[in-house]
Image (cartoon, rainbow, N blue to C red):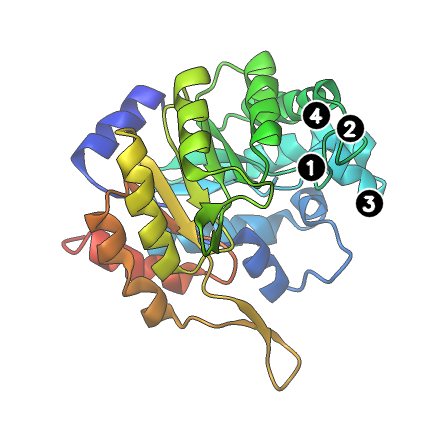
Amino acid sequence: MTLVELETQLRKRILVGDGGMGTQLIEHGLTKGECPELWNVEKPKVIKKIHSSYLQAGADIFLTNSFGGTRIKLSAFGLEERTDELNFAAAKLAAEARINGKFIAGSIGPTGQFLEPQGSFTESEFIQAFSEQAEALSRGKVDFLLIETMYDLREALCAVKGARKSSDLPVFVTMTFKKTPRGFFTIMGDSVQKCLETLERECNIPVFGANCTLDSKDMADLIKIMRKWTTRPLIAQANSGQPLLSAENQLVYSQSVMDYVRYVPLMIKNGVNIIGGCCGTGPEHIKEIAKIVKPSA
């Protein structure tokens, strides 16, 4: 698949993304302190099963299990020397699970660290880490790279530079915003306008949007604001509400499936082009989104 093919599809219809990979991994037994990316080589059948469940639910786009796949992030598990192996395996598993006509996004998440002066890392160190990950995902034959859950525009720009340093694939970006009394901002204080103008005008990112933190109602409001600042395709991947602990001490989310999807028509009205889910969402969410987006399917 190419960017031209994807853009052709986006001109025709709304596309459906997948849901939370981490949520599904936890349901399949991932425990606190485990490295999700290690399952690409230790439990590949589980990863392919998760991919297949989203595709069967109606996803047009699905993400590799590589969200925390930078060398910097993997070093927390002592796996930094396996960066190439784990990312390449993530892409290959997605390719094996692919159904014709579906798009594979190479997931690239934040490093979990901060740039100077808030942190100890330089921009060049971030760029190199993202470049290494992007190269492995590209070699594994993903269709495009999705830099996601970015809460710092500076880190997002490093990720874009790194991805383009080692890959010719299209690069999309989704930022993560919090709702405040003054509007929507990243935790580093980046406004919606600043993020979109920088990503579009300075980086020429063809598709961008937001994921994580917000529930579907707030995400619909955010998309309306984003649409004021750009005519390019927008991605929305909201959380299923806020994480809570149940009476049984299990992690649950505040939005039910039907409450989550009730705001999908508003997202569409407000100008979204790709709708998926983030934390707390699963195949059941994607199935209901697909019913709204593709009612004749």
Which of discs 4 and 2 lies nearer the camera? The answer is 2
Give amino acid for label 1: Thr
User: Mark 1 or mark 4, which has the lower sequence index?
Assistant: 1
Q: Residue at x 66, y 80 (%)?
A: 249
- Tell me where residue 218 appears, x and y as whole percent: 38, 57
Label 1 sits on residue: 111
Q: Amino acid at mark 3?
A: Phe
Of residue 126 and residue 228, the one placed in the foreground of this image is: 228
Q: Amino acid at mark 2?
A: Phe
Q: Is residue 269 left or right of residue 16?
A: left
- Assess whether mark 4 and mark 1 are in contact (beta carbons under 8 angstroms): yes
Q: Earlier in the sequence, mark 4 or mark 2?
A: 2
Q: CA distance from mark 3 to mark 2?
A: 18 Å
Q: Which mark is residue 233?
A: none
User: Do callouts 4 and 2 mark residues in contact (Cβ within 8 Å)?
Assistant: yes
Mark 3–mark 1 distance (CA, rounded to whole Å):
13 Å
